[in-house]
Image: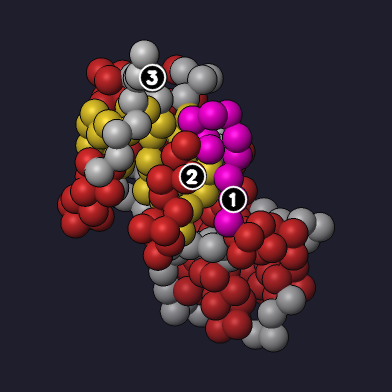
């Protein structure tokens, strides 16, 4: 007797990527694409409708991002198996997704090569994180994270705001902003504000 195919929900705001996934899955006798979604809200709706075995979840999407969607889905079904699809290797993004309940993390440039194996592994109850992502996690495992306020300040720095403008936008003093900037540079090991923004984007702490 043949085992039932693994039922899959693909969530990504780019239809081309979903088409690529559909083609890959169509050739697999043990897999079936049961639904697609283009943002986090649709993902939750489609998950409720179809109860897929494995959900492929993009992180950067309009309306609702992937991490929030993972939290919502896992809140409703603790048995949901979710693989994150992303272009980001940043350790902060990875940690957010894993803490939200994702069991797999797959870089989009490796989809063709590794998607099918990753689906089978996660469906069987295993976790899967690519080596380059795991090394990023290990590298920053003991780092002190930025506070919510420091992330706000870094985000405003990335938008080209000077300390005075940041102070006005956050309703705090310029001295307080300077203190936050000093702390951000120290925690990130950055030489200056521009370097801090580069590190923040690379690690997935902020989006540009």
Given the current orientation, which residue lies at the most extreme front position? 1
Neighbourhood count class around disc 2 (C-alpha, 10 Å): few under 14, some 14–19, many 20 upward: many
The residue to which callout 3 is attached is: 3
Query: Of the residues under marks 2 and 3, which one precedes in the sequence?
Result: 3
Name the dominant secondary structure of the magenta segment: loop
| Cα–Cα span, label 2 and label 1 | 9 Å
Q: Residue 118 carries which label?
A: 2
Q: What element carries label 1?
A: loop
| Residue 170 lies in the magenta stretch | no
Position in image of residue 92 (x %, y %): 60, 56
**Camera-side mark, 2 or 1:** 2
- Tell me whether circle 3 and circle 1 mark residues in contact (CB < 8 Å): no
**Camera-side mark, 2 or 3:** 3
Residue 50 in view (yes/no): yes
| Cα–Cα span, label 3 and label 1 | 27 Å
| Cα–Cα span, label 2 and label 3 | 18 Å
Assign the C terminus to one quadrant of the image: bottom left
């Amino acid at each position: 007797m043949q085992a039932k195919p693994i039922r899959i929900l693909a969530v990504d705001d780019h239809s081309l990527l979903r088409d690529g996934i559909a083609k890959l899955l169509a050739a697999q006798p043990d897999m079936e694409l049961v639904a697609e979604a283009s943002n986090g809200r649709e993902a939750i709706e489609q998950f409720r409708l179809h109860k897929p075995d494995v959900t492929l979840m993009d992180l950067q999407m309009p309306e609702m991002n992937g991490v929030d969607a993972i939290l919502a889905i896992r809140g409703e079904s603790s048995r949901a198996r979710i693989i994150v699809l992303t272009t980001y290797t940043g350790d902060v993004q990875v940690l957010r997704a894993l803490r939200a309940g994702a069991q797999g993390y797959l870089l989009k440039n490796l989809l063709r090569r590794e998607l099918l194996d990753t689906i089978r592994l996660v469906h069987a109850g295993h976790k899967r994180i690519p080596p380059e992502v795991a090394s990023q996690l290990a590298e920053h495992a003991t780092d002190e994270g930025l506070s919510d306020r420091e992330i706000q300040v870094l985000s405003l720095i990335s938008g080209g705001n000077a300390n005075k403008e940041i102070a006005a936008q956050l309703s705090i003093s310029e001295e307080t902003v300077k203190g936050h900037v000093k702390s951000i540079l120290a925690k990130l090991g950055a030489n200056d504000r521009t370097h801090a923004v580069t590190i923040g984007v690379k690690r997935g702490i902020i989006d540009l």
